[in-house]
């Protein structure tokens, strides 16, 4: 099955209800340099198989998501297209930006297959690669964000041939991908390339100041014995990855510093000030949400928290709340009845890293009266004896309605109760992409309407207000 696009002829795969084009190169890039878009192919493009993913060390989450064994190469800027039909129907387009802490992941993971969304909502789905780690986010280069912008430009210029409407693009992503959505809302360079955004569990604490970016660049250069990024341009790739791994493992501030070692940064070009604050000013419609137990994915298996006691819990709370520690612990005990020390710490860190920052962006947007919605994914997975609850990344397969993809059942179980959750969640994504409304009232200061996704989904007004107030005072 072939298609004639503005870039040339491409040969894809015909599935039962969708047409799929894999591994389409949208740009090339020299190390640490901005991407150079590909505008044509010399011969027919074979788009029947995925191409190389970006160089990385595959992480725990990516393994759970079915990370592929594809080769790695610095020329990794490829995207994948899933469409009901390559015709002139001008369907809504969903562009997926993968997570992985800006250091791992790819658009070719099985959980991100867009076929089910295509069939369910008559939309076109795009998944993409962008440069990761030091290659994508050394200092203030922001190469990974520039790659995402190049992919969106490719969609704008050629997507009518794939049955999509390039003027009706919704960007969506999870974790680092969610914070990338917020970052694209913050930069004028992406203006006009999308109409709306859906940020799932955005890791907003990863977004860096210029000072933090320059500090980590200094660490990178010192570890490599180099005086500038130019001097690293010809260093063997494995050496760069090894240095990157050492920096992440030895971050002096623990996980907080590791998360901001390689990530989007203020650069006085794409971003001239705090990124999340700038995103709050963008009038484009935005959905923001988190899972109930984000950090359980990490704390459940943390040796440091395996035997934590009440004293250890108090010490960790005290770092965040100081003199308000007693009140904070009491609030979390009330909100999580029966929770042990590790579960209390996990709940607190979930709010610190994910939920409170997402609400901060939402609050900034409603003060400007720009269209904003919030949700809360609370379905608990029975996997690992139920210890993960509604953890980070568990909602991805539900958003794509990919309950039977590789690795999903190990993470979610096989229960039929998953189906209504996937129906509601994926339909919200599709409704937002198609009609600009996910299906529940907008978030505002008076009501704080929040859609809860579970076996029985419902709209709540200001869920857990005591915890919200606790963090609003920080």
Image (cartoon, rainbow, N blue to C red):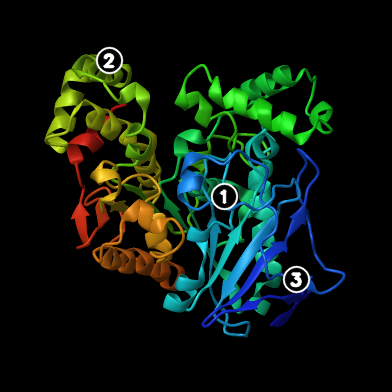
Query: Which residue is label 2 attached to?
Result: 315
Determine the CA span between mark 2 and mark 1. 37 Å
The mark closer to the camera, 2 or 3, is 3
Question: Dot 1: what SS?
Answer: helix
How many numbered discs sit on the rendered protein? 3
Determine the CA span between mark 3 and mark 1. 30 Å
Above/below status of 16 relative to 341: below
Above/below status of 81 relative to 362: below
- Seen as rendered, the residue at the extreme bottom is 88
The mark closer to the camera, 3 or 1, is 3
* Mark 1 residue crowding within 10 angstroms, few (<14) / some (14–19) / many (20+): many
Residue 412 place in picture, x, y as percent: 33, 55
Badge 2 or badge 3: first in the primary sequence: 3
Question: Dot 3: what SS?
Answer: strand
Which numbered disc covers residue 362? Answer: none
Is mark 2 in CB contact (under 8 Å) with mark 3? no
Question: Considering the image in quadrants, where does the C terminus appear?
Answer: top left
* Mark 2 residue crowding within 10 angstroms, few (<14) / some (14–19) / many (20+): some
For the point 33% across and 45% down, the residue is 391
Which numbered disc covers residue 46? Answer: 3
| Residue 54 appears in the figure | yes
For the point 18% across and 29% down, the residue is 340
The mark closer to the camera, 2 or 1, is 2
Badge 3 or badge 1: first in the primary sequence: 3
Query: Which residue is label 1 attached to?
Result: 184
Q: Is residue 260 left or right of residue 330?
A: right
Q: Quadrant of residue 161?
A: bottom right
Residue 281 place in picture, x, y as percent: 48, 47
Above/below status of 6 relative to 265: below
């Amino acid at each position: 099955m072939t298609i004639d696009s503005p870039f040339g002829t491409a040969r894809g795969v015909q599935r039962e209800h969708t047409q799929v084009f894999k591994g389409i190169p949208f740009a090339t890039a020299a190390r640490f340099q901005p991407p150079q878009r590909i505008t044509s192919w010399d011969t027919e493009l074979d788009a029947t198989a995925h191409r190389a993913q970006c160089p990385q060390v595959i992480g725990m989450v990516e393994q759970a998501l079915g990370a592929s064994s594809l080769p790695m190469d610095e020329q990794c800027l490829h995207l994948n297209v899933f469409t009901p039909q390559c015709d002139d129907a001008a369907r809504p387009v969903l562009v997926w930006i993968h997570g992985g802490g800006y250091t791992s992941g790819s658009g070719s993971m099985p959980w991100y297959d867009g076929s089910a969304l295509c069939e369910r909502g008559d939309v076109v789905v795009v998944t993409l690669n962008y440069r990761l780690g030091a290659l994508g986010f050394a200092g203030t280069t922001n190469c990974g964000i520039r790659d995402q912008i190049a992919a969106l430009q490719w969609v704008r210029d050629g997507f009518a041939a794939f049955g999509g409407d390039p003027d009706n693009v919704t960007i969506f992503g999870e974790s680092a991908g969610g914070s990338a959505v917020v970052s694209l809302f913050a930069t004028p360079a992406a203006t006009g390339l999308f109409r709306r955004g859906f940020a799932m569990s955005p890791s907003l604490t990863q977004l860096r100041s210029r000072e933090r970016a320059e500090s980590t660049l200094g660490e990178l250069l010192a570890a490599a014995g180099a005086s500038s990024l130019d001097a690293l341009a010809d260093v063997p790739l494995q050496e760069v990855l090894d240095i990157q791994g050492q920096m992440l493992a030895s971050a002096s501030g623990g996980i907080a510093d590791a998360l901001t070692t390689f990530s989007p940064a203020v650069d006085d070009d794409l971003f001239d000030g705090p990124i999340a604050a700038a995103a709050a000013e963008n009038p484009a419609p935005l959905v923001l949400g988190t899972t109930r137990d984000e950090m359980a994915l990490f704390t459940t298996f943390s040796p440091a928290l395996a035997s934590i006691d009440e004293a250890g819990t108090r010490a960790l709370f005290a770092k965040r709340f100081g003199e308000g520690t007693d009140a904070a612990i009491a609030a979390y005990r009330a909100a999580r009845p029966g929770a042990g020390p590790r579960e209390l710490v996990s709940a607190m860190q979930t709010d610190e890293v994910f939920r409170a920052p997402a609400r901060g962006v939402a609050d900034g947007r409603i003060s400007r009266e720009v269209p904003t919605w919030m949700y809360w994914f609370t379905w608990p997975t029975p996997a690992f004896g139920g210890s993960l609850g509604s953890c980070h990344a568990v909602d991805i397969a539900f958003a794509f309605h990919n309950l039977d993809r590789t690795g999903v059942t190990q993470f979610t179980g096989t229960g039929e109760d998953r189906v209504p959750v996937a129906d509601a969640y994926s339909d919200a994504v599709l409704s937002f992409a198609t009609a600009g409304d996910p299906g529940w009232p907008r978030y505002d200061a008076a009501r704080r309407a929040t859609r809860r996704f579970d076996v029985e989904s419902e709209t709540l007004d200001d869920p857990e207000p005591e915890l919200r107030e606790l963090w609003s005072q920080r």
